[in-house]
Image (cartoon, rainbow, N blue to C red):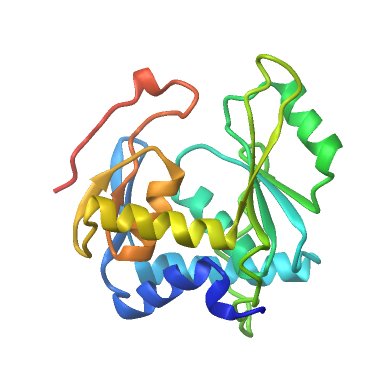
Amino acid sequence: MECVTNNIVSLFDEQSLKTPEQTAMIEYKLGRARAITYKDIRKKVLDQSKLLKRRGVGKGDMVLIMQSMSSELYINLLAVLRVGGVCLFADPSISKSVFFSMIKMLRPKMVLSRFMPEIYFKSFKGSVDIVPVKLKDAALLTFTSGTTGQPKVIKRTHGFLHEQLSVLKETLNVESGEREITTLPMFVLLNLACGVTTILPNGSLSQPGQTKYQWAN
């Protein structure tokens, strides 16, 4: 059965309404730390959702996202899920051949990458409600590296993500108000759903060994 709460983005939405002034993310740009509250991220997600909807992205449509570690990556991810879309999650370190093979194989409705200008942060009138989905509906699609052959698609449904986040929350004893440094998108989603502040390292996913870890006061 389709239901709003089946959509994994509903967990973030509930948390952002519960703790709007709490810091959701701390990221580093131009050598300076920038704190972003849950309220700020939710507003940007809503704005991006409206723009995606205006550009024809709807339920079941695939959007290829290829961006480095940043708040923009997660804003786009949450926005696509909010309108019922499916995220094709691409590692920024993949080769051009793999990138174009992804596009050729799945033909996404839209591509959001670091090569394109930012299309959010512009407010639109109206509202975009969370689109109801089934637990078996796809939420995230990722690709294997393709280093040993043709890249393969890994599918994660909304139901799978709900179960995974539930297990991680219980296993790691995650509590609201904590701070965590992570480079793993799944743990960032967990933090956003649980009221944890995520500190995004100053680095690139393609060169994790050169990532600089800084602590924010």
Residue 148, horizontal then vertical, whole percent? 67, 14
The residue lying at 41 percent from left, 57 percent from top is 165
The residue lying at 63 percent from left, 29 percent from top is 144
Residue 54, horizontal then vertical, whole percent? 76, 70
Q: Nearer the viewer, residue 135 or 68?
A: 135
Relative to 143, say whether 137 is above or below: below
Quadrant for residue 166, please give it. Answer: bottom left
Q: Nearer the viewer, residue 38 or 175?
A: 175
Residue 183, horizontal then vertical, whole percent? 38, 37
Q: Is residue 83 left or right of residue 190?
A: right
Q: Residue furthest bottom?
A: 126
Q: Is residue 204 left or right of residue 173?
A: right
Badge count: 0
The residue lying at 34 percent from left, 33 percent from top is 202
Quadrant of the image for the N terminus?
Answer: bottom right
Residue 135, horizontal then vertical, whole percent? 61, 67
Relative to 208, say whether 35 is above or below: below
Quadrant for residue 157, please give it. Answer: bottom right
Relative to 118, say whether 195 is above or below: below
Q: Nearer the viewer, residue 85 or 136?
A: 136
Q: Is residue 156 left or right of residue 55?
A: left
